[in-house]
Image (tube, helix red, strand yellow):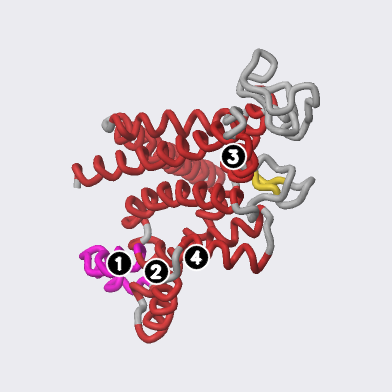
């Protein structure tokens, strides 16, 4: 009798676990389906998604989309225009521009070069925005929900940081700690965190007045539980859209730093440094080395802005 009871209990537990697993999968599927419908309902968002997807795909499959290394030099064709051998032409050292372009996208979106031999998933711009998102969201949540004098001190400090022109702040940070991919990530995180903190703080001040937050307080839930489980999930929409825009800002900032010689160290395929070196040959009738990376930066930033703006319009329409 005891064995039958234990066996029945085990079967009930398995059935419960399966139901919970199926329920979790169904919730995930519904969320993905809702996100797809949201994107498809906006033509601008679809255009942005196509542009961003193109760059992500070529970045992932870069080694299979070109026969050339981004640092390989063809001394028989320096500064050459588009040809069958080099579809987008070559730079002043004979390096294939298509290879450098897609490997540059790889550094921006897909892989972060920690050292010459160590790379981690996630591009430089992605990691910079992710770190700024974590830091800014933490400061905004605590400031908006807990408040008090620590909130006042932190917010005034962040206001002071935001009063400094963005490009100047980037230059100060990178010039102080040196030019490398990791330092560019640090600069993006420092510059982006204050804006995210203010956004999350404003959302928190609004959400904390809702009934479900009051119910959680009545149940005796801790402040951390309320911030992470009640407030943050309900603030994710505006935060995700803001993060998309900030990835575009980060890409533009990387291009600016590279153009000024403070981006990724050579011979890395940095789009900004490609523009800086290529502009010297524009007046000589060879604009290709500056044209293609400029179009790459512009198209990716515009694509991210289209995607974020389209999603924001659709979310506002359904609120």
Which residue in the rendered view is the most extreme toward the bottom?
Answer: 149
Q: Give coordinates of residue 307: x percent, y percent.
A: 37, 38
The residue at 71%/45% (across/down) is 119
Q: Are marks 3 and 2 in contact (CB under 8 Å)?
A: no
Determine which quarter of the picture holds residue 171.
bottom right
**Over which residues does the magenta segment extend?**
199-221
According to the picture, the residue beneath numbered tag 4 turns out to be 135
Per the rendering, the mark at residue 279 is 3
Name the spot of residue 156 as percent of width and height, x first: 39, 79
Q: Residue at image x 31%, y 29%?
A: 40
Q: Give the mark, 3 or 2, whose residue is nearer the N terminus.
A: 2
Residue at the image position 47 percent from the left and 64 percent from the top: 193
- What is the x, y in percent for residue 226? 36, 67
Q: Which mark is residue 202?
A: 1
Q: Closest to the observer: 87 or 142?
A: 87
Mark before the other along the chain sequence, 3 or 4: 4
Residue holding disc 2:
140
> Furthest residue to the front?
284
User: Quadrant location of residue 58?
Assistant: top right
Q: Is residue 137 above or below residue 49?
A: below
**Who is closer to the viewer here, 224 or 216?**
224
Q: Is the Cβ of the residue at disc 1 closer than 8 Å to that at disc 4?
A: no
**Left or right of residue 105: residue 37:** left
């Amino acid at each position: 009798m005891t064995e039958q009871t234990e066996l029945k209990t085990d079967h009930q537990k398995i059935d419960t676990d399966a139901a919970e697993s199926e329920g979790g999968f169904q919730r995930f599927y519904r969320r993905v389906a809702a996100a797809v419908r949201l994107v498809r309902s906006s033509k601008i968002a679809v255009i942005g998604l196509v542009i961003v997807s193109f760059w992500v795909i070529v970045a992932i499959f870069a080694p299979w989309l070109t026969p050339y290394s981004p640092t390989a030099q063809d001394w028989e064709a320096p500064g050459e225009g588009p040809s069958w051998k080099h579809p987008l032409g070559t730079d002043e050292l004979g390096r294939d521009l298509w290879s450098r372009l897609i490997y540059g996208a790889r550094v921006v979106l897909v892989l972060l070069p920690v050292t010459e031999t160590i790379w981690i998933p996630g591009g430089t711009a992605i990691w910079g925005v992710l770190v700024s998102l974590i830091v800014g969201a933490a400061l905004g949540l605590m400031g908006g929900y807990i408040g008090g004098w620590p909130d006042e001190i932190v917010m005034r400090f962040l206001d002071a940081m935001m009063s400094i022109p963005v490009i100047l702040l980037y230059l100060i940070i990178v010039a102080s700690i040196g030019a490398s991919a990791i330092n560019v990530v640090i600069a993006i995180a420092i510059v982006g965190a204050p804006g995210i903190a203010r956004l999350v703080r404003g959302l928190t001040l609004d959400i904390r007045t809702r009934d479900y937050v009051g119910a959680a307080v009545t149940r005796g839930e801790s402040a951390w539980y309320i911030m992470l489980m009640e407030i943050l999930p309900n603030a994710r929409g505006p935060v995700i859209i803001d993060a998309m825009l900030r990835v575009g800002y980060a890409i533009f900032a990387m291009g600016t730093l590279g153009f000024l010689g403070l981006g990724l160290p050579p011979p890395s395929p940095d789009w900004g440094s490609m523009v800086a070196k290529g502009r010297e040959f524009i007046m000589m009738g060879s604009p290709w080395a500056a044209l293609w990376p400029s179009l790459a930066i512009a198209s990716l930033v515009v694509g991210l802005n289209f995607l974020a703006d389209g999603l924001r319009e659709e979310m506002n329409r359904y609120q």
